[in-house]
Amino acid sequence: MKKLLIAIIIIAGIMSAQEKKGKISFKDDVMPIFQKKCMNCHNTEDESPSGFYLDNYAELMKGDSRNGPVVIPKKGEESILILKLRGTATFGKQMPRGKIVLDANIIDMISKWIDQGAKNN
Ligand code: HEC
């Protein structure tokens, strides 16, 4: 009986952690990926390709790169950012250019962040 109770408590704990995880954070979840995989090319110190900068949230959302806004809030799968990561954009190469494609789970996560409103959270 005691074991069952402990199991229930553990499962409840995992479920509430997952609920929290459902909400994607720009600062904690999305930005670290850009820092690791994209910023060596897309940064304001070098002249970023396509005029697309990923230094921070404001740069990402500015929408003044060569092909216009790359993030359309609430429309992850239609956003250029996701099309470029999935390799389905109608121009240029799949991102990160010349590197290993991001894991599908990571692309899904970024797409979900956009679906949740692409907030600076
Ligand atoms: C090795 C350098 C390099 C890396 C790393 C890189 N990119 Fe790029 N990126 C480019 C170049 C060059 C272009 C312009 C040509 C093209 O569209 O393929 C570009 C274009 C883009 C565009 C299109 C912007 C527009 O409006 O035209 C997006 C979005 C983008 N990159 C996102 C990313 C993301 C997200 C990452 C990290 C996962 C990344 N890139 C990593 C070189 C890079």
Image (spheres, helix red, strand yellow):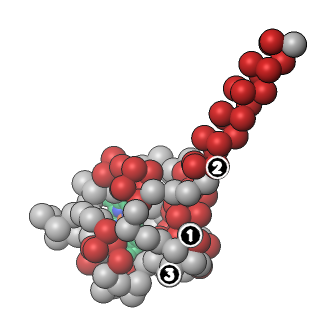
Cβ of mark 3 under 8 A from ligand 1? no
- Residue at (61%, 54%) from the top-left corner? 22
Q: On the image, which quarter does residue 66 sit in?
A: bottom left
Outermost top residue: 2
Q: Secondary structure at mark 1?
A: loop
According to the picture, the residue beneath numbered tag 3 turns out to be 72
- Crowding near pointer 3: few (<14 within 10 Å), some, many (20+)? some
Q: Is there CB contact under 8 Å for labels 1 and 2?
A: no
Residue 5 placed where, x, y %? 79, 20
**Closer to us: mark 1 or mark 3?**
1
User: In screen coordinates, is 5 left or right of 118?
Assistant: right
Going by the numbered disc 3, the residue's amino acid type is: Ile
Task: Name the kind of residue labelled 2 in the image.
Answer: Glu
Tag 2's secondary structure?
Answer: helix
Quadrant in the rendering for residue 48: bottom left
Residue under label 2, please give it: 19
Residue 61 point in image, percent of width and height:
35, 77
Q: Residue at x 47, y 47 (%)?
A: 100
Tell me which amino acid carries mark 1: Gln
Distance in Å between CA atoms under marks 1 and 3: 11 Å
Circle 1 residues within 10 Å: few <14, some 14–19, many ≥20 = some
Image quadrant containing the C terminus: bottom left
Residue 82 against residue 108 in the figure, above or below:
below
Residue 64 vertical position relative to residue 93 in the rendered view, above or below: below
Q: CA distance from mark 1 to mark 2?
A: 14 Å
- Say which mark, if any, is on residue 116: 1
Query: Of label 1 and label 3, which has the lower sequence position?
Result: 3
- Which residue is more in the foreground, 95 or 60? 60
Left or right, 1 with reference to 58: right
94 or 36, which is in the foreground? 36
